[in-house]
Image (tube, helix red, strand yellow):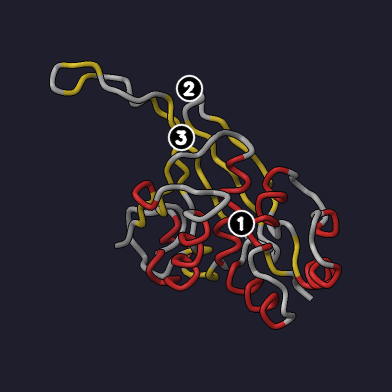
Amino acid sequence: MAFRSVFDFGSIKKEFEKAEINTNFIPLIWKYVIQNPNCELSEVPSLPARAHALLTSKFKSTTTTVDSVLESNDNVTTKLLVKLQNGAYVEAVIMRYDSRLGTYGGKPRPGGPRATLCISSQVGCKMGCKFCATGSMGFKDNLTSGEIVEQLVHASHLCQIRNIVFMGMGEPMNNYTSVVEAVRTITAFPFQISPKRVTISTV
């Protein structure tokens, strides 16, 4: 049986409600998993016993793993090759920049070092854009909302992510439900990325 990601909000909320477990525990579970990579869900503190039993039988702290991390020569870009539970791969890319570079209106720009994460929403893509390497793959599969969110979880262990762009593999609007659920998760506690800093790119 394939386990589901604990970051798959729709699934875990449904299971908690069915078992009459308070869904307010869910963000606290996420926070613990983020702070304790590769932990077992049985280790999450302050949960009722039936929550531990449900989590360990149906969910995993992460269903994906980072297969490789490639740094650009200038250390500005980091590419994560993420392996899914079914053996497929997607890419997530961290792009670092300093918003103080250059001038605005002849004056120094405000800000500082920031990092944007480029996230994938599908394995392959059915749109077939000629300029896109993913388009040549054809469509393979949709990512679950948990698999989308886990890209942020993996990246956050390397640096603090300020912005999210859905410009990785796949056409987000062809996986609308999972993408919307993922956005609602990453803009909520404990991720709390501002909705104004999330961009969904579509053809």
Q: Residue furthest left?
A: 105
- Element type at marker 1? strand
Asked if residue 92 is positioned above or below residue 15 in the image, the reply reads above
Gap in angstroms between the C-alphas marked 1 and 3: 23 Å
- Estimate how packed mark 3 is, as few (under 14), some (14 to 19) or many (20 or more) residues with alpha carbons within 10 Å: some
- Element type at marker 2? loop
Q: Residue at x 56, y 55 (%)?
A: 90
Q: Residue at x 50, y 49 (%)?
A: 192
The percent position of residue 54, horizontal first and vertical second, equals 80, 72
Q: Are marks 1 and 2 in contact (CB under 8 Å)?
A: no
Label for residue 102?
none
Q: Residue at x 14, y 17 (%)?
A: 106
The percent position of residue 25, horizontal first and vertical second, equals 68, 62
Asked if residue 200 is positioned above or below residue 112 in the image, the reply reads below
Foreground residue among 153 and 194: 194
Q: Residue at x 52, y 59 (%)?
A: 185
The percent position of residue 83, horizontal first and vertical second, equals 66, 55
User: So how many labels did they put on this image?
Assistant: 3
Under mark 1, the amino acid is Tyr
Residue 43: quarter of image: bottom right
- Estimate how packed mark 2 is, as few (under 14), some (14 to 19) or many (20 or more) residues with alpha carbons within 10 Å: few
- Element type at marker 3? strand
The residue identified by callout 3 is 115
Under mark 3, the amino acid is Ala
Left or right: 191 as drawn, with respect to 66: left
Q: Earlier in the sequence, mark 1 or mark 3?
A: 1
Q: Earlier in the sequence, mark 1 or mark 2?
A: 2
Q: Earlier in the sequence, mark 2 or mark 3?
A: 2
The residue identified by callout 2 is 74
